[in-house]
Amino acid sequence: VIGGSINQHGMILIEATHVGADTTLSQIVKLVEEAQTSKAPIQQLADKIAGYFVPGVVVLSTLTVIAWTIVGYSDITKVKPDFVDDGTLSRDEIIFQKAFQYAITVLSIACPCALGLATPTAVMVGTGIGASNGILIKGGEPLECSHKLKCIVFDKTGTVTHGVPRVARVAMFVEDSVCSFVKLIAIAGTAETSSEHPLASAIVKYAKQTLKTEILGKTQGYQAVPGCGLQCTVTQIDGVLVDIDLEGVNNRKNLMGSTKVMTDNVLFDGEEITATIEESSLVGAVASKPYKVLIGNREWMTRNGLVVTDKMDETMTEHEHLGQTAILCAIDDNIVAMLAVADTVKSEAHLAISVLKDMGLQVVLLTGDNQKTARAIARQIGIHKVFAEVLPSHKVKKIKQLQKQGMKVAMVGDGVNDSPALAQADVGIAIGTGTDVAVEAADVVLIKNDLLDVAAAIQLSKKTVRRIRINFFAASIYNLVGIPIAAGIFVPWGLSLKPWMASAAMAMSSVSVVLSSLLLKTFKKPSKEKMLTPKYYAKFAADQELDNISVHRGVESLPSSREPSKQGSIISRLSGKKKTPSPDHTSLLEMNNMSDSDSSDI
């Protein structure tokens, strides 16, 4: 039950899992408050300047006393009291009264308040404006750093795509006498119940909808290999098969209400397929039998001693060229079917990429999916450089590689396995609908799940940094002009300040800096309608014919030598701890399941 829901009829018993400070709204408010009070790197410069500025002003004030004392004793006519002297003041009193007056004026006008307010006021307004536009910026550092970005790295599943894949096709490679369609769906759906991968969820959902059941079989010995697939033993599918409505399931064009799912048989001319699967009756009592199941990509099948024929590869390639993920399913050492899973690209993805390119940024797609699918998705969204088949542990290394080229890198992701890369990047940007770990690791959270907000966050950063620099310039000019006047340097020309005037000027300088920062409230996120220009439409048409996409295989493009593990520093950023894991132990990141792979953990 979501906060704000209305129960219209009857009674409902609700258990609150998060209350008070733990609610989503409270957490957002807390993050905004922490961001508004955090210091940007440029603020550290201001603090350093203030550290030298204050003692410098004290020294300057002392020198002012000494200078005017010398001037007074040299020529008393140059030291005129501010009141009518009735002769009661001695010469020494007049000199020291004037000297200390100028010294106090210097101290009054030279308060570093304006310098100290230049950054925090702009950061406070900037983060507030970001939050009101659905961009949650966690502090001054990412707000400042974003304007320095040279490269934006996008994850695929759930980031540039909707992250809600569906089964688009089931292609059977064997006759029903070897493995029936319903048995395939029951076994594959059961095998995937142990996985939390988005593609696995799509297969499980399809199986339950097709078989009209919420209960599938059991799995034993489940093992998922990142970047490849899974293997397990499926048992207890007897009850599932017994209760099947065969007449409904056999409607292959529109199975049991599943929308737009193509199911067909892809038979092999002149090829003999040895049937080692023991077919059991789908009606009546069914003998309980365990099935050895392999689900994954080509490499996973080859690694387990199975041959991917040219026809199978051709069938998979057909869907991979459409940007879909093709998954092979083997039962008892026979590849029996291919399942094509589609995850549609977000409508604003191409426009967002185009805007980022126009800003002079290099855009990269980083995905665990196979090269053909990655190329198809890249063509749809207009990205020229792609790293495909990247394992979870290699995502961090990819970010480091780009950083070693001297670029400030931002990572945009949503999954658990994107979290280390989000932490490693100079600016980590998480999709608001992503996992809690990813949101926690990121520096910027896009609450509205809109990729156009990536460009908006960078634009807001540029405007905020520009405003900070204007504030610094104004504060510096104020001190450079005000201190000499306060010290009495321009007295010969009739220009001087009283202490109260200096105090008022100091207050006005602080107010002017605050007002300058408040001008950030005029920032407005560019609307999508204004971005859809004729120039963009021409670029969109050109990108659909894009043939100069550079696709690199993740493992091959990494250095062959193993770098010393630095994952401890990343984990410490996620957990707040600084302990570095022993190099003798395998990093947990090496064994994490993928959130964006071809068929890993599916």
Image (cartoon, rainbow, N blue to C red):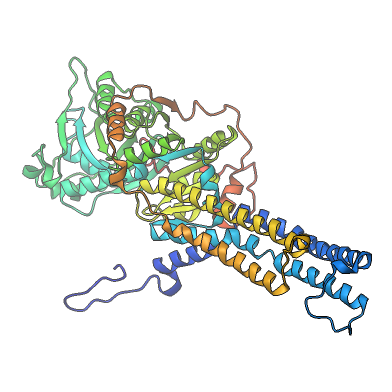
Left or right: residue 6 versus residue 500 is: left
Question: Does 314 appear above or below 176?
Answer: above
Can residue 367 be seen here? no
Left or right: residue 101 versus residue 306 is: right
Please, which residue is most extreme toward the left here? 247
The image shows residue 487 at horizontal and vertical percentages of: 78, 63
Which residue is depicted at the point 69% across and 57% down? 481
Which residue is depicted at the point 42% across and 57% down? 522
Can residue 172 be seen here? yes
Q: Nearer the viewer, residue 44 or 119?
A: 119
Question: Does 141 appear above or below 85?
Answer: above
Q: Quadrant of the C terminus?
A: top left
Which residue is depicted at the point 21% across and 17% down? 271
The image shows residue 121 at horizontal and vertical percentages of: 55, 62
The image shows residue 235 at horizontal and vertical percentages of: 28, 46
Please, which residue is most extreme toward the top here? 270
For residue 480, what is the image quadrant?
Answer: bottom right
Q: Nearer the viewer, residue 20 or 285?
A: 20
For residue 109, what is the image quadrant?
Answer: bottom right
Which residue is depicted at the point 26% across and 43% down? 203
